Image (cartoon, helix red, strand yellow):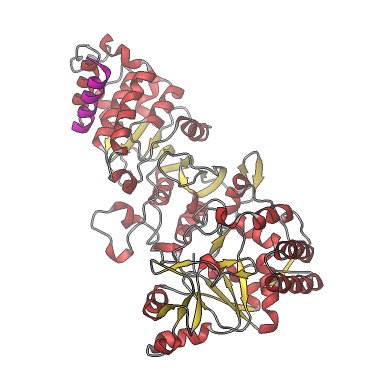
Amino acid sequence: MDRAARDERLRDAVVAAGWDAVLATVAGAHGLTVPPSGAVEDPALDPWRDPAAAARLGTVHEALLGESVDRVGRGSFYTPPDLVDRLLDHALDGLPPGGTLLDPTCGTGNVLVAALRRLGPDAVDRVHGTDLDPVAVAITRLLLRLEAPGVDPAVLERTVRVADGLGAHPAAPYDAVVGNPPFGGRLRPRGRVAPGDAVAERSPAAYTDPSAVFLARALELVRPGGVVALVQPVSVLAARDAGPVRAAVRAAGAVTDFWSSARPVFAGTPVLTCVPVVRVGAVQGPVRVAGREVALPEGEWGPLHAPALGVPVVAPRTVGVLGDLATCAADFRDQYYGLVPHVHDGGAGAPLVTAGLVDPARNRWGEEPTRFAKRDWRRPTVDLDSLAADPRLAAWARARLVPKVLVAPQGRVVEAVVDVDGRWLPSVPVVTVAADPDRLWHVLAVLLAPPVVAGAAARYAGAGLSAAAVKLSARQVAALPLPAGRAAWDAGAALARAAQEADDAARPDLLAALGEQMCTAYDDHAALDWWEMRVRRPRAVTKNSRRDNTPLTGPTCGPGV
């Protein structure tokens, strides 16, 4: 039988599921006799004790998932070996004699098999797993049986189960919970949770990523002194709706180690991932990150991811926050969709400024096209006369048509521009910062300051659509610190105004001077070179990738994110 025929038979067996079907097809593909039930020492299994051969089962099943539209929807991405090793380095460190391990979403068992190889075949009854996919569970049982040929199959039926990892675990508590739960799926709003949807029902917030829900559940399954090491998307570090999960980790123990990557590690998805290692019952201290110790913040955990992104560490001298001198607001879907019938291209009215048009000290409205409501526009303009027919929108427009600073929600640095005359209307999700007219340039100088940008990039790392983006909500803009050096701040404000009023040729040098002046105002120059490199980079490389400003569902739009 040629390789293609064997692969086809193997694929058919995987689809059919079931222990017997998988085992029979594996043996048949190699011309072997299927071992009778209970004859676990049968030499017919010898060829499949070769890890390279056994791994083909998982590879074939993953290929099947890759061909399925459901794979991305379920967040099913199997764990590469080097990441498995990293997880087990932490999960098995300090595992007590006889200690037990659980992978709540074990897939085809690559984490469990690697764990058993480290622990030895006599530990097969201590390695537990659950998965909703019966095919994956059958493959896991087979691979574990190959590692421990003397095991009674009934033991594997108890320890590796077709079950919801968020559900009951008869063998709990465990000494370690480790694995790669599904991630990347957006949950439904709380009022539309389907009965039996365990992930949504257990979510601490409406749009928490499924992987964070598994993290919260794992904390309940580990005994004091035990370890949780689950792969997470980096959004868990800064997303508002993951806040309760971060708080649950704090309440349960301590994050002792942390790993993250600035590049995707899973084929087929751009999602960046991390591994916060939690020791249940421990007292929180510094976290080991890339060979150095980092303090774990109370709220967002972005600073743990910052070293992977190359964000410099800053310690500016500050007095107060931006919210002390300005009001920061973000608009919502009602304003976005309400404006649609009142927007035309050019003519009389208020320029509609989308996020893609805002650069540092520059508004490109009318100079380049943008997208709004799934259309391309050269000069999107709001007809204020027709808008007056809608009292709610008219009141909103009056509140926004004031002198202000407009802030793009994410960009290569904090990108903001002053609307001196109060003529522009912001398009969702642009943030509006209203202040006294004589303080607007001071506000702009703060938003563009290198220590502020680096601090925000670190604190909220993982919240943006890309690793390079600095993403801020209205609440987070209001929390940005003000400088202690007031004279240098005044000089920075003058340079901010000069940069915005300059032409494209002169603006870069003025921005550089502004950056240096604001470093003096904050008494911190650590981020100046990093900031200058980002502020001078070609705009198309790092600009907000969502050029159409259609509001996103979930926590990516709104003031609390």
Viewer-side residue, 127 vs 403: 403
Which part of the image, by quadrant, shows the N terminus?
Answer: top left
Q: Is residue 7 magenta?
A: yes
Residue 32: name its quadrant: top left
Viewer-side residue, 557 vs 3: 3
Residue 81: name its quadrant: top left
| Left or right of 321, for residue 302 | left
Q: Is residue 25 magenta?
A: no
- Determine whether 474 is above or below 298 in the image: below
- Residue situated furthest top in the rendering: 43
Residue name at image x 61 percent, y 49 percent: 306
| Left or right of 64, for residue 371 | right
Residue 413: x percent and y percent?
A: 62, 60
Residue 326: x percent and y percent?
A: 62, 78
Provide the major secondary structure of the magenta segment: helix
Residue name at image x 29 percent, y 38 percent: 67
- Determine whether 172 is above or below 553 in the image: above
Query: Does residue 160 appear in this view?
Result: no
Range shown magenta? 1-17
The mark total stands at 0
- Determine whether 433 is above or below 231 in the image: below
- Residue situated furthest right in the rendering: 487
Residue 399: x percent and y percent?
A: 51, 85
Residue 466: x percent and y percent?
A: 51, 52
Residue name at image x 72 percent, y 57 percent: 315
Query: Does residue 555 appear in this view?
Result: yes
